[in-house]
Image (cartoon, rainbow, N blue to C red):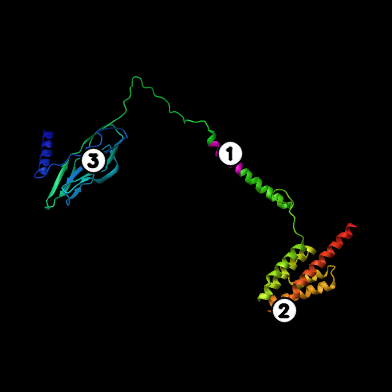
Amino acid sequence: MRRLLSCLVVLLASAVLMSGQESAPATRLSRDTILIGDQLEWIIPLQMEPGEKYFLEDIADPPAPGVEIIKPLAIDTIASNRKKIEIEGKVILTSFDSGSYYLPPLIAMIERKSGKVDTLFMEGPTLEVTTVPIDTATYVIKDIKGQIKYPLKFKEVIPWVLLALLVAALIYAIVRWIRMRRANRTFMGKPIVKDPPHIVALRALDKIRKQKLWQNDKQKQFYTEVTDALRVYIAGRYGIVTMERPSREMLADLKQQDLDPKLYDNMEELFTRADLVKFAKYQASAEENEEVIPDAVRFVNATYMTQLDEEKKEED
């Protein structure tokens, strides 16, 4: 009796809700039956005229016990012309339990151009979820298989082999370069021949002469480069620490060498004048500047010849 009354109440409610309103299209599923874990679309169609507005109630999540929503409701227009617009709402569903599921009815409202609001009552479809049938008479439970191991292929190994060879070659090149540098040789093993100090000095002095620095009002740079070239030569010729030292200290060490007094006096005068130009803003005369390069070249040549005489005496 109670069941009969419940059915009557539902029928009356539906009749009241549907009275005076147009029939609603039924919602449908893209497939009526799926396997456990498969996905399908729940399609909700609507039709209206251009300029009319619609409202679709929210779909509960889950829409039914045992049914899950993978992708929520999305509305898309599938056809449109001057008289009619067709739209579809789609919800992607799945289920992980076999059985029959009754999806709930949906209510949509459309506001017509006249201002009238139509309520559409759309029944929900039934979803059948099945599982893979198992023949219990012949089915045998088997253990889980281990991970499949495939044989190693050459094309998988070759990149690592090439990388190892490249790293080994790089290490070898670095070690060889360090050893050759310590042995004063090139990477290929040839001895590195360095120019003797007097050749380096004469080449530097000739370059300074060609630059014509003092003639172009660069007197300070002129004296700096000349004295630097002489400092490098004196350090290579006599083994005296010359760079980053005051001129008087360097000259004191140079005086201890077996030098011609005139050569030493010329060097002392040249370095003293250079210090005045660099630090005291002294302006040397043209005659003084013209004698700088010849005096420096004379000093290098004379001391180098003295070195040759000493080497010949040692050989004899």
CA separation, marks 1 and 2? 71 Å
Residue that carries the numbered disc 3 in the rendered image: 43
In the depicted structure, whether residue 102 falls above or below residue 235? above
CA separation, marks 2 and 3? 103 Å
CA separation, marks 1 and 3? 57 Å
Q: Nearer the viewer, residue 290 or 170?
A: 290
Give the percent coordinates (x, y) of residue 74.
26, 45
Segment colored magenta: 156-166
Amino acid at circle 1: Val
Q: Nearer the viewer, mark 1 or mark 3?
A: 1
Residue that carries the numbered disc 1 in the rendered image: 161
Q: Is disc 1 placed on a helix, strand or loop? A: helix
Q: Is disc 3 placed on a helix, strand or loop? A: strand
Disc with the residue nearer the chain's start (1 vs 2) = 1
Q: Nearer the viewer, residue 299 or 182?
A: 299
Please tell me the numbered disc located at residue 104: none
Amino acid at circle 2: Ala
**Which residue is depicted at the point 72% across and 75% down?**
275
In the depicted structure, whether residue 99 falls above or below residue 138? below
Does the image show residue 219? no
**Which residue is depicted at the point 66% across and 75% down?**
216
Residue that carries the numbered disc 2 in the rendered image: 286
Amino acid at circle 3: Ile
Does the image show residue 121? yes
